[in-house]
Every structure is written in C-alpha cells, then in structure tokens.
Image (cartoon, grey):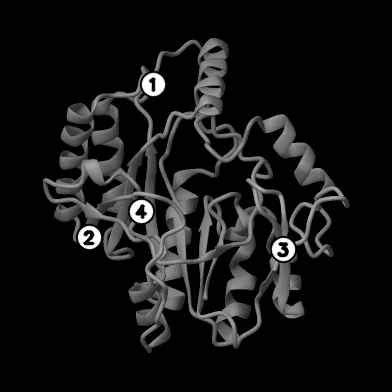
Amino acid sequence: MIISASYKTDIPAFYGDWFMARLRAGHCRTVNPYGRQVQTIALDRGSVDGFVFWTRNAGPFRGHLEAVAGLGQPFVVHLTVTGYPRPLDAATIDPGNAIDQVRWLARTFGGRVPVWRYDPVVISSLTPPAWHRRNFSRLARAMSGSVDEVVLSFAQIYRKTARNMAAAARVFGFDWHDPDDDEKRALLADLAAIAADHGFAATVCGQPNLVGAGIGESRCIDARRLGDVAGDAIAADARPHRKNCGCRASRDIGEYDTCPHGCAYCYAVNGRTLAKERYRQHDPGSDFLFAPPSNIPQAN
C-alpha cells in the first residue's frame, strides 16, 4: 500500500509531528470526506510500500524525512514552487527557499525523490500567459540538475474555488479567467519545451485532454518512481484515487480544510479562516489529523 500525505493538506509544512507520532504508533485514523465514516489506516513497515509527500514547504519536515529514510521507508516528495504574487499565495515561502529545499532533497536522498510541481496554473491579470513563460523559465533554470520531472495542471474551478478567487480579486483588484483548452495547450507546450531545454520532462496531472505537444500524463502516485527510490520494484493497484488520473492506488491520510497556506485557488479549503482555526485546534497526539464529531460511523 502506498500512503499519500497528503493531497488534502500540507502535512510536511504543518503536521510533521503528528505524522511521526502516527508512524511510531503504526496507524492513523481518517474520516471519509463523503460518507464521513471513520477509517483506520495501517502505517507499519509491513503494510506500507512507500510514502508520497505533498508540500509547499519541506523545511519543517527535514528531520522527519531523515527519520523515515532511516527506517528504510522509500518516499517521494512533490514540492510545489510557483512564485505567485501574494494576492494568489498568501503565505507560501519564497521560491528561492523552496528551490534550496528541492536541491537538498536531491542531494540528500537522490534525484528520484523530489518532483517539482508548477501547479495549478492560474491565468489572471497578475499572472497572464507571458508572465508564466518568464516565471517558469526562471524557476526551471534554478531546478535544472535537481529534478527529472515537473508536474503541471490548470486550476480546477470548483464552486468554492470560484468563490475564493472572486473574493481575492475584489480585495486585491485583479481579474482572472479559466482559459479554453486551446489556450491551455498552447501555454503547456511552451512550458514543456522550456522544461526540456533544462533537462527534465513535463507532465500534466489529472487533465488527459491536455496531454500532447511534448507533455505526457503525470503519475503523481508513481510506483515506478518509488521502486527506483527503494531499489526494488513496488507492486501497486492500478486504480487511481480519482477519475481521469494516471496514479496508482493509495490511501490518503490528510483532511480537507486544514491547510492554512491561504492559496486563493485551493480546491482543498473552503476558506482560510476555517483552515487556520482547525490548525489551531489540531492535537498532534490524536489518532486523527483533525478529530471528527464522536457520533460518526466506523468503517473497516
């Protein structure tokens, strides 16, 4: 079983102590976001084939990563670095700091461990396509030699995403829109060419309609990459966690509405106020990242 930690929240940046406590305990408990049943997920060495970590700031997690490696557990770290202006990214770290973290990951654990994420791509008056081409080129130059893949995708405009983006646009005075597929493909082709010029591949996450022109489909939960890190093949169920996804099967141990980074386009947070309050209430000694009400049903 592959453990995802987590596409629902930033465990390395905010919840590292909780993760390590649960790793030592050999299990954690989560709440299904749809049926709200409680599930127990095994985290012992015999049950886990590897970890996929997702973060915008691996700095607070450095010592924990070294401890996980010391236990012989393979892992991959997806580190998002976009360099967006503050109206879009309220509290993410400076891209130079994040790039240093990518370099440290490659130097310390090997070049297959870090994966750069330049996603979601947001088109706005602050970040038009020409801005992305310049910004991506600058970041790609700095990433060269430390990563072999960059994952791209365009923002998925769910109802809460549109509401939060509209609120940020009113406050900070910018415009934004969701481009049509032709505009998306044109920008992705340019970004893929820039990535190739700097020695790594570009892939698209969860949007197979945009695959092409030098850009393939991402497998963010990638058993082959984890196997390369482990030095041995990892067998994983091919079922992805969502439709139109190239990932292998995994169990995610995060919880929605718990990441206080404050990214205006985030699909995993209804609002930063709620996320900050849940972060404040978080108990690193709990089985749960965020404990549910006591009256919800149990599941196997």
| Nearer to us: label 1 or label 3 | 3
User: Mark 3 is on which residue type?
Assistant: Ala
**Depth check, front residue: 257 or 124:** 257
Q: Quadrant of the C terminus?
A: bottom right
Q: Which residue is mark 1?
A: 126
At numbered mark 1, what does the secondary structure look like: helix, strand or loop? Answer: loop
Give the residue displayed 80% in from the left and 50% down from the top: 292
Q: Residues within 10 Å of mark 4 (few under 14, many from 20)?
A: some
Instruction: Quadrant for residue 247, please give it.
Output: bottom left
Please state the horizontal and vertical placement of residue 160, each as a whole percent of the image. 56, 27
Q: Is residue 195 above or below residue 200?
A: above
Q: Is residue 58 left or right of residue 35?
A: left
Q: Which residue is mark 2?
A: 200
Instruction: Quadrant for residue 180, please give it.
Output: top left
User: Mark 1 is on which residue type?
Assistant: Leu
**Depth check, front residue: 226 or 260:** 226
Q: CA distance from mark 1 to mark 3?
A: 45 Å
Q: Is residue 19 left or right of residue 130?
A: right
Q: Which residue is mark 3?
A: 299
Q: Is residue 136 left or right of residue 114?
A: left
Instruction: Quadrant for residue 280, please give it.
Output: top right
| Nearer to us: label 4 or label 3 | 3
Q: Is residue 257 left or right of residue 82?
A: right
User: Mark 2 is on which residue type?
Assistant: Phe
Q: CA distance from mark 2 to mark 4?
A: 21 Å
Q: Mark 2 or mark 3: name the one nearer the start of the chain.
A: 2
Q: Residues within 10 Å of mark 2 (few under 14, many from 20)?
A: some
Q: CA distance from mark 1 to mark 2?
A: 27 Å
Q: Is residue 188 above or below residue 292?
A: above
Q: Which residue is mark 4?
A: 245
